[in-house]
């Protein structure tokens, strides 16, 4: 409760909706950790397909129109959030998106509760007005960055007081992404579905079919390889971008790769898909804020080839867990693919041990949650000390 020097806090997270994204997954994971630690986990949200998971992990959702950017709704949400804070005895207000962050900031200042933000992306800006809109995410009493790349972006572009930024890497579920739990039956089933030949190594590129994910660079790199003794799988939802998929298929035919490249719309068993691969590729031409593919693949013991910018610079160890190549350069990607496909079974085993150990040490869900709870407790300790000394509470004024 508020003012407790060893708090089991009431935490209210605010997120527009609970879908499949990383921000949403992180929200649910942290809510579960708060509840497991004896605290009270609340999430203000407009709903979403994964809202039911909150109840499963011991948290509670509160329906609010926090997905709206309507100025009148944003203003009304200030009072709604303040009312929840007072009624529920909220100790920490943690927001994960810009539009509701403006309402949450006002509510936090009105009620005097510490205000935490998580910076989930670069929130690109092309003009001062857009930058001002983004700046709310840098106004937390603590600002959580999901990678070193995002922390650098915040420091370079926004005014944040020294010591307020905390880098907390996104965490992945090491129970799901665990090679010891993937059965042979699962892999055989997927190999049949994806038409993977037993005697050919598989190269995997996971990711939605959006241009910046680098599919064209990947296909051009495959065309440069010195042999065709592999199967390449591009797996990801087109989300209605049929013209882009047709463009990629045409590019495959142009390079004469029809017999080695497979497209798959979706898989509900990505751990098993990654286990089938000899190497996993992240070819994004724009920097990823974090990028789940490298740590998930490495957790499965698979080396990664990723572009040398954004979150990948922290999630891939050059020469140890994979390769970092310049973005948008098919020749460099092809060279890395040649190296990866030439690994001996012994080298693959050695690299798998390093990749798995690296992910366990830095990118587990448990570590992400523990570090987030530490931020909460740190703020509550500061507030308690301020109250005891008769000072202004953090966030007030």
Image (spheres, grey):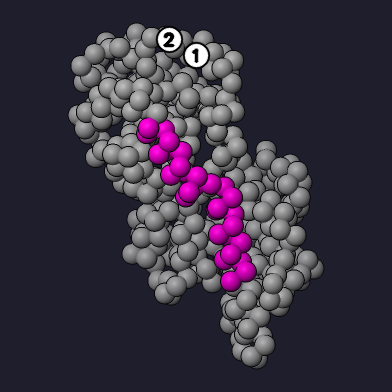
Residue 382 horizontal side relative to residue 223, left or right: right
Task: For the residues labelled 2 and 1, say whether their Cβ atoms are less than 8 Å apart.
Answer: yes
Q: Which residue is mark 1?
A: 191
Q: Position of residue 209 (x, y in %)?
A: 43, 29
Toward the viewer: 220 or 188? 188
Q: Magenta: predominant secondary structure element?
A: helix
* Quadrant assignment, res 93: bottom right
Numbered mark located on residue 198 in the image: 2
Callout 1: few (<14), some (14-19), or many (20+) C-alpha neighbours within 10 Å?
some
The vertical placement of 139 against 236, above or below, is below
SS for dot 1: helix
Percent coordinates x, y for residue 113 in the rendering: 65, 73
Q: Quadrant of the C terminus?
A: bottom right
Q: Is 17 inside the magenta-drawn segment?
A: no
Query: Which portion, as a residue range, is magenta?
Result: 350-378
Q: How many marks?
A: 2
Nearer to us: label 2 or label 1: 2
Rendering coords of residue 164 (x, y %):
47, 71
Q: Residue furthest bottom?
A: 390
* Residue 220: x %, y % from top left: 25, 23
């Amino acid at each position: 409760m508020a003012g407790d020097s060893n708090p089991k806090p009431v935490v209210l997270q605010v997120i527009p909706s609970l879908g499949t994204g990383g921000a949403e997954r992180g929200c649910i994971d942290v809510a579960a950790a708060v509840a497991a630690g004896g605290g009270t986990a609340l999430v203000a949200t407009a709903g979403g397909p994964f809202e039911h998971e909150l109840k499963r992990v011991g948290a509670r959702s509160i329906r609010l129109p926090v997905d709206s950017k309507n100025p009148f709704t944003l203003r009304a949400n200030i009072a709604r959030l303040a009312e929840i804070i007072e009624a529920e005895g909220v100790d920490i207000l943690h927001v994960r998106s810009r539009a509701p962050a403006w309402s949450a900031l006002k509510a936090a200042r009105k009620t005097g509760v510490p205000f935490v933000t998580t910076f989930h992306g670069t929130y690109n800006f092309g003009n001062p007005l857009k930058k001002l809109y983004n700046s709310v995410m840098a106004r937390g009493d603590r600002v959580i960055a999901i990678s070193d790349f995002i922390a650098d972006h915040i420091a370079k572009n926004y005014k944040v007081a020294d010591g307020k930024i905390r880098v907390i890497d996104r965490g992945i579920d090491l129970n799901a992404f665990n090679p010891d739990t993937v059965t042979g039956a699962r892999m055989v089933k997927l190999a049949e579905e994806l038409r993977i030949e037993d005697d050919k190594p598989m190269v995997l590129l996971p990711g939605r079919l959006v241009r910046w994910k680098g599919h064209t660079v990947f296909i051009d790199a495959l065309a440069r390889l010195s042999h065709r003794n592999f199967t390449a799988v591009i797996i990801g939802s087109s989300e209605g971008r049929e013209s882009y998929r047709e463009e990629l298929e045409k590019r495959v035919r142009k390079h004469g790769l029809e017999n080695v490249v497979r497209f798959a719309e979706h898989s509900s068993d990505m751990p098993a898909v990654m286990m089938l691969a000899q190497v996993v590729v992240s070819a994004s031409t724009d920097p990823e804020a974090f990028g789940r593919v490298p740590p998930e693949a490495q957790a499965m013991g698979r080396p990664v080839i990723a572009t040398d910018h954004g979150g990948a610079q922290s999630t891939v160890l050059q020469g140890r867990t994979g390769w970092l190549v310049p973005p948008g350069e098919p020749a460099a990607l092809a060279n890395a693919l040649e190296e990866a496909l030439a690994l001996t079974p012994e080298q693959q085993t050695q690299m798998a041990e390093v990749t798995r150990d690296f992910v366990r040490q830095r990118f587990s869900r448990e570590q992400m949650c523990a570090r987030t709870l530490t931020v909460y407790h740190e703020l509550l300790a500061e507030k308690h000390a301020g109250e005891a000394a008769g000072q202004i509470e953090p966030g007030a004024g």
